[in-house]
Amino acid sequence: MLVELFASKNCRACPAAYKTLKAVEAERGDTVMVLTWAVDYWDYLGSKEKMALPESKDRQRGYVERFELRGPYTPQSVYNGLTQASGNKPAKVGAAMMQAEMAEPVNVSIERNGQRVLLSGQPGGLSDIWWVSYLDAGDNTTKMPNPVTGVRQLGPWLGGKAELTLPACASGCLLVVQEAGMGRVFATLRAN
């Protein structure tokens, strides 16, 4: 499961979300991947958020539209693109994870052979293939779980079979296959 956290160092509730989601990731092992997308819209409250990326705000805006929220907030957490909750409340995090886990399975798979990846299946519509770079445990000096350092779209995918060559990975990287328009996450692959 992919858990995405939108956070800022100027957000007072974010440290609790870091703790909650690090605990979830530790407890669930390889079945959960947490990525933190730092945002800068709280910079006026304190110091500048150095980890913020313009893509973080764009991605969160997509989820705001998808979930029909009044606006973005921190610490917002999103679960496989299917549901969202405040990331600092363990009960809400647990309920959101359970809801995402109950979703009907999708026939999408990723197989890796070195730097080559074979994508196969039928997502049922247009999907985006994202390459997300993040600081993994060895390189991460922040309190954020796996803070995102870069993202790029590798292309669209309509289903069937597709072969990709993975870009270079400096620290941690994740390949994400997601329904277009910040929809459901169909598959992920850790590439580090």
Image: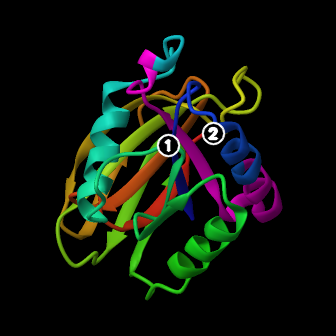
**Residue drawn 33% across and 35% down?**
57
The CA span between labels 1 and 2 is: 7 Å
Name the quadrant containing residue 130. Answer: top left
Crowd class of label 1 (few under 14; some 14 to 19; many from 20; radius 10 Å): many
Amino acid on which the number 2 mark rests in the picture:
Cys
The residue labelled by disc 2 is: 14
Contact check, label 1 and label 2, Cβ < 8 Å: yes
Name the quadrant containing residue 15. Answer: top right
Which quarter shows the C terminus?
top right
52 up-or-down from 15: above or below: above
The residue labelled by disc 1 is: 74
**Residue drawn 62% across and 68% down?**
92
- Does residue 165 appear anywhere in the picture? no
Report if residue 26 lies within the magenta region: yes
Q: Secondary structure at mark 1?
A: loop
73 up-or-down from 121: above or below: above
Give coordinates of residue 107: x percent, y percent: 39, 81
From the viewer's perspective, is 155 left or right of 57?
left
Q: Which mark, by number, is residue 128?
A: none
- Does residue 28 appear anywhere in the picture? yes
Give coordinates of residue 26: x percent, y percent: 81, 54
Nearest the viewer among 168 and 92 is 92
Q: Secondary structure at mark 2?
A: helix
Give coordinates of residue 99: x percent, y percent: 53, 81
69 up-or-down from 42: above or below: below
Q: Which residues are magenta?
A: 22-44
Task: Say whether disc 1 or disc 2 marks the residue closer to the N-terminus.
Answer: 2
**Residue drawn 49% across and 12% down?**
48
Which quarter shows the N terminus?
bottom right
Amino acid on which the number 1 mark rests in the picture:
Thr
Nearest the viewer among 59 and 154 is 59
